[in-house]
Image: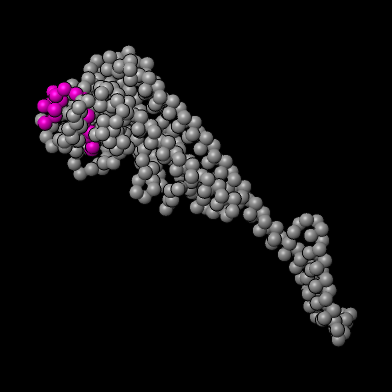
Amino acid sequence: MARKRKKSRRTFKSIRLKKPGLPPGSVVFDGQRKVEEVTIDSIHYDAENLIETRITDPSQIDPVRRKPGTMWLDVIGLHDTEMIDSLGGMFDLHPLVREDLVSTGQRPKVEFFDDYVYIVVKMVSWLDDGGLAVEQVSLVVGRGFVLSFQERPGDVFGPVRERLRSALGRIRTLESDYLAYALLDIIVDNYFVVLGSYGDQLDDLEEVILEDPTPENQAHLRDLRRDLITLRRAVWPVREVVASLERTESKLISAEVRPFFRDVNDHAVQILDIVESSRDVVGGLMDLYLSSLSNRMNEIMKVLTLFGTIFLPLSFLTGLYGMNFDDMPELHYRYGYPILLLVMTSVVVGLLYYFKRKNWL
């Protein structure tokens, strides 16, 4: 079912620039605070066991990290720069990576370091009011751990968590690089869900525009066009990200997992094709709206012109016989008025017949 929008809204996120003059590596949050406090959820697992905990003190991380298996730390909220910086220090993240973690206007990218891989992507979802939310998600993939950083609660990682809990597939038997693949894959696959909703909206709009185009339809088309541009900006660099992960020679990405990134790349290409096709459809619907509006206006002008043409000779006759001259013929004739009405009726009928013969009606 198509999602309804109450009004036009902006989906582009304003980019907040940091204060000029700060040294490189300054951990300064430049987004909007979307949570009251930063939370850290830990999932530690191996082929046999899984433990989920809510980390309340960063000092709890190191004992969990030392256990055999893979640890996934999901950090929600980026405004606490001291905590983010401290967490980055615990995992020996480069100062520039720590800076990027709290810079929410990053373009999707991947950076390879000796001990970890840093990935930035955009996650899209629906807001409660029907608007499109675009959120930055950062992944740090190291030997035995994955760190994910989100701006706000609510994500698309639920199926991955369920696979971990139920030990479905190979996710519990492989290492952190496969978990990173699973997270990237679910983010990219969710683009299909969002685009499917846009497809429904476009189908509904086409029917409405053909029947009764309204200014609300035009505003809706503008919103869709803006959202599709936002999606394109989010998806286009993802191809480069997953292609780099597929071709990398980093020891952190095993040869067994690289083909899975090729599959994510294929999905990203499909999504881009759908986005481009949807943008073409929006452009076609905008032309259809303008054409329908023009045709409707032409029909209205046609009716008004016909009425004006019919009343023009009638106005002439009434004006002619409305002149105040005593010696006008038929002025005092007893049946002059009915005869005039008969003539006027004959003129109307004759004009309608003529318009019909000319296919103007």
Task: Tell me what residue is drawn at x 72 percent, y 64 percent.
Answer: 307
Is residue 62 one of those drawn in magenta?
yes
Rendered image quadrant of residue 20: top left
Residue 330 vs residue 11: left or right?
right
Residue 136 vs residue 142: left or right?
right
Above-or-below relation of 243 to 214: above
Can you give x and y, in whole percent of width and height, for residue 82 in the image? 16, 33
Can you give x and y, in whole percent of width and height, for residue 252 in the image? 27, 17
Rendered image quadrant of residue 94: top left
Task: Tell me what residue is drawn at x 40 percent, y 44 percent.
Answer: 10
Is residue 314 one of those drawn in magenta?
no
Residue 11 vs residue 70: left or right?
right
Above-or-below relation of 299 to 241: below
**Closest to the observer: 166 or 308?**
166
Residue 104 makes an appearance in the image: no
Task: Tell me what residue is drawn at x 53 percent, y 41 percent.
Answer: 282
Residue 228 vs residue 35: left or right?
right
Task: Tell me what residue is drawn at x 30 percent, y 14 percent.
Answer: 250
Can you give x and y, in whole percent of width and height, for residue 174 in the image? 27, 22
Q: Which residues are magenta?
A: 60-78
Tell me the quadrant of the picture where the C terminus can be found. bottom right
Total marks in image: 0
Rendered image quadrant of residue 166: top left
Residue 64 makes an appearance in the image: yes
**Closest to the observer: 113 or 198?**
198
Above-or-below relation of 158 to 130: above
